[in-house]
Amino acid sequence: MNSLKVLFDRDTWQEIFGSISKNKTRTVITVIGVLWGIFIYIALSGAAKGLDNGFERQFENIAMNSMFVWAQRTSIPYEGFKIGRSVELKLSDIEVLKKRVPEIEFIAPRNARGVFGGSSPLVVRNNKSSNYNVYGDFPVYTKIATKKIYEGGRFINEEDIKYKRKVCVIGERTQTELFEKDEEPIGEYIRINDIYFQVVGVHKFVPGGGFESDGDIFIPFETYRQIYNSGDNVQWFTIAAYDDADVVKVEKDIKATLKRIHRVSPEDERAFGGFNLGEIFNKIVGFSKGMTLLSLIVGIATIIAGVIGIGNILLISVKERTKELGVRRALGATPSEVRNQIIVESVFLTVIAGILGIILGAFALAGINAATADLTDFPYTNPTVPIPFILAALFIMVFLGTLIGLIPAQRAVSIKPIDALREE
């Protein structure tokens, strides 16, 4: 009750502002210490979150725990096979991988023309033609890497696979280059290597989906297999593990399984290549968390230094107000009233400094957001600090302000009225 009485007492606040006004320069300099600490915390935490958001945006169209695995050449002789043997992935590998690596959620076999240094197929539409990469895919691929299809179209479906339909999904650049400006491509035909394909969809290109571009053409895997006589061969697997899986271990298990299937030495690290997006994303998340922790440590350390400065100011203030405090005690002020007044002053200075630091930090993040709003090549967007983090910082400041205020408050209470009144 005494604390609330002091808090809402007009005379208390007059004395607090009177004390602050007597030492304006010293107070401002000390308050800046707390302000700077919370500013650093807000700015660094927001910057780390912006980086985190940027990478999430880059990976939003592909599963976080995804990876690519492909076959290469052996580097170790094994079971009578010589070094340098070319290994081929097969469709039959899929069922074996699913059984032996239960952490796999989705696996999509993929073939392509024009992607890895080969010549891209010629695609013709009336009197217009150009070369584009052509992919053979199953519908499951879209569960790993999202394909944004323009309204009215679709991606490859199971019926296309079953009946080996000659249908295709073209890219937005392909549409621009092969069709007239106002022409609707859905339902029209294009020729790929002199074979007619009906356009069933147009995909919007979004960076971050692997090797793909805005001109790519997707056809059913079985149709690709028939046209290019690829048999059961698969150029690479696009794989997504379950969210709680260890992606590094999953990749090792997949490669170990493939080595057993294709009779490759367990020590051969070159026979199968891989690119683990999940591992990269986890490292990015770890870096972002490290940045947030660093900002917390640096911010709190700076806040503590500033709060200690406020404690020093109040100690000096108490010494300068010895006679005033003695008069108050002589007139009947209780020790708790004097103590609470000093603590309120400490908390007030700390909170004001903290709020100013938060406001400046918010302005800084708004400026960074405006400067990076149009960046597409750099993974950075929307630097923000969650409200709970800000409230936690304010709570810490109130706690520290109270704690540091106890020192000068106890000094004030220890002053004997008779000694204070004698002091000149």
Image: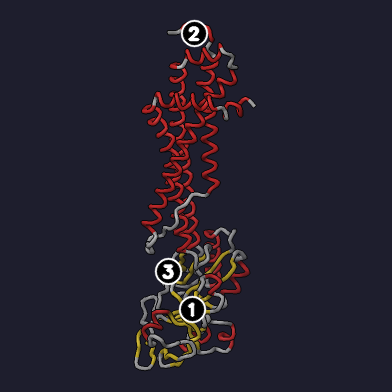
Residue 153 rendering spot, x and y as whole percentages: 51, 82
- The disc placed on residue 5 is none
The residue beneath circle 1 is 150
Residue 105 rendering spot, x and y as whole percentages: 59, 67
Circle nearer the N terminus (1, 3): 1
Vertical position of residue 386 compared to residue 267: above or below: above
Of circles 2 and 3, which is in front?
Answer: 2
Which residue is at 53% across, 48% downward?
A: 387
Task: State how far apart marks 1 and 3 are (Cα).
Answer: 16 Å
Which residue is at 44% across, 66% downward?
A: 270
Of circles 1 and 3, which is in front?
Answer: 1
Q: Nearer the viewer, residue 424 or 411?
A: 424
The residue beneath circle 2 is 421
- Tell me if mark 2 has few (under 14), some (14-19) or many (20+) residues whose alpha carbon lies within 10 angstroms of its own: some
Please identify the quarter of the rendering in which residue 205 is found: bottom left
- If the image is split into quadrants, where does the C terminus sit? top left
- If the image is split into quadrants, where does the N terminus sit? top right
- Disc 2, SS: helix
Looking at numbered disc 3 in the image, what kind of residue is underneath it?
Pro
Which residue is at 48% across, 41% downward?
A: 296
Residue 264 rendering spot, x and y as whole percentages: 50, 69
Vertical position of residue 252 compared to residue 398: above or below: below
- The disc placed on residue 207 is 3
Vertical position of residue 173 compared to residue 265: above or below: below
Looking at numbered disc 1 in the image, what kind of residue is underneath it?
Tyr
Please identify the quarter of the rendering in which residue 7 is found: top right
Task: State how far apart marks 2 and 1 are (Cα).
Answer: 85 Å
